[in-house]
Amino acid sequence: MTVLYPAVLAAAVVLTAAAIAAYVWLQRRRTRVLVAVGFMAPRDRAAAVRRHLPWALLLAALPIMLVGVARPEAEVAVPRVSGTVVLAFDISNSMAADDVSPTRLGAAQAAAGEFVRAQPDTVDVGVVVFGDQALTTQVPTDDHDLAVAAINRARAGGGTSLGQAIMVSLGAITGKPVTLPEDDGAPPPDLGYWPSATIVVFSDGEETGGIDVETAASVAAAAGVRIQTVGVGTPEGATVEVDGYRLSTALDETLLSAVAQASGGAYHAAGDAGALADTTGDIDLRLTTKKEPVELTAAFAGAALLLLAAGALLSTRWHGRII
């Protein structure tokens, strides 16, 4: 605990000591006067309590009140939802499928926009788009309008590399490029520990190549970063036209579930645009704590007033006067 005016504490010690000394002197003087007139107070413990307890309460209130005047502060761990969320958007050709209205990508953009707007300003939001490769289109920021604008700029095209998406998302969180070692026997990169960071992947899960997704997920898990996956599309699937050819595409919930579970996250299923928007409300973010100074003046003042009231009440009840 710290105080804004430490000099008041010294004054509290001096004034309290002086008040106690004055009370003791007055009580001794009273006793001498009573003895001089031939009156001997009964040696009754209950009478002694009634005589001294009100004054003890009033004297105890003095230092507590003065400590409150000194403006004490304490650091208290305040829980809050905070940290960093990176939204990774699958923009591969399959995201143009219309088994979710208006398209998989369009539904994901709408749901993600609602998700971002619902976050407090203590959450920094970044945006990564990925196809065959991944690109950070918005570094994590507390300006959520910038994140929403980056989400709305995404356009479908190319293949899908979930592993690349995870690695670039980790780079957006740590602020530096993250790559896997070329040697298969080498340990994964040490990114430090980021327990307040979360990656939310919007994808249909149709992996077409690139970095092994389970290896990338294990790197995230080692860094304390959870991956939440949101399935966009339907298991029944649809067809999309790519370079004049019509290709079948369907939601791969098994892969998306495995990616999430590998990092301690969860898979969120959605079959249509409305359900997808509801799903983003269930995404679990980290509850962290931050130490914040809290002024304790009111608490000390309340305690002092309580003691003063108790002392005055007892004095009035037992002696017919406050002091």
Image (tube, rainbow, N blue to C red):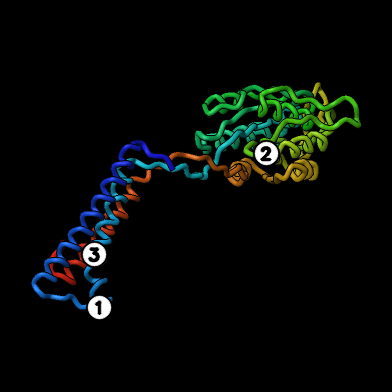
Residue matched to label 1:
44
Label 1: few (<14), some or many (≥20) within 10 Å? few
Q: Looking at the picture, tell me which residue is in the foreground, 323 or 252.
A: 323
Q: Position of residue 253 (x, y in %)?
A: 77, 44
Give the residue type that dot 1 points to.
Answer: Asp
Q: Nearer the viewer, mark 1 or mark 3?
A: 1
Question: Taking 135 as reference, is 10 left or right?
Answer: left
Q: Position of residue 47 (x, y in %)?
A: 23, 75
Residue matched to label 2:
100
Dots 3, 2 in contact, CB < 8 A: no
Label 3: few (<14), some or many (≥20) within 10 Å? many
Q: Residue at x 78, y 39 (%)?
A: 250
- N-terminal-most mark, 2 or 1: 1
Give the residue type that dot 2 points to.
Answer: Val
Q: Quick one: which residue is furthest to the left in this view?
A: 37
- Element type at marker 1? loop
Q: Residue at x 66, y 35 (%)?
A: 194
Q: CA distance from mark 1 to mark 3?
A: 17 Å
- N-terminal-most mark, 1 or 3: 1
Give the residue type that dot 3 points to.
Answer: Pro
Dots 1, 3 in contact, CB < 8 A: no
Q: Looking at the picture, tell me which residue is in the foreground, 147 or 214.
A: 214
Q: Quadrant of residue 311?
A: bottom left
- In the displayed structure, 199 sits above or below 53; it is above
For the C terminus, the image quarter is: bottom left
Residue matched to label 3:
54
- N-terminal-most mark, 3 or 2: 3
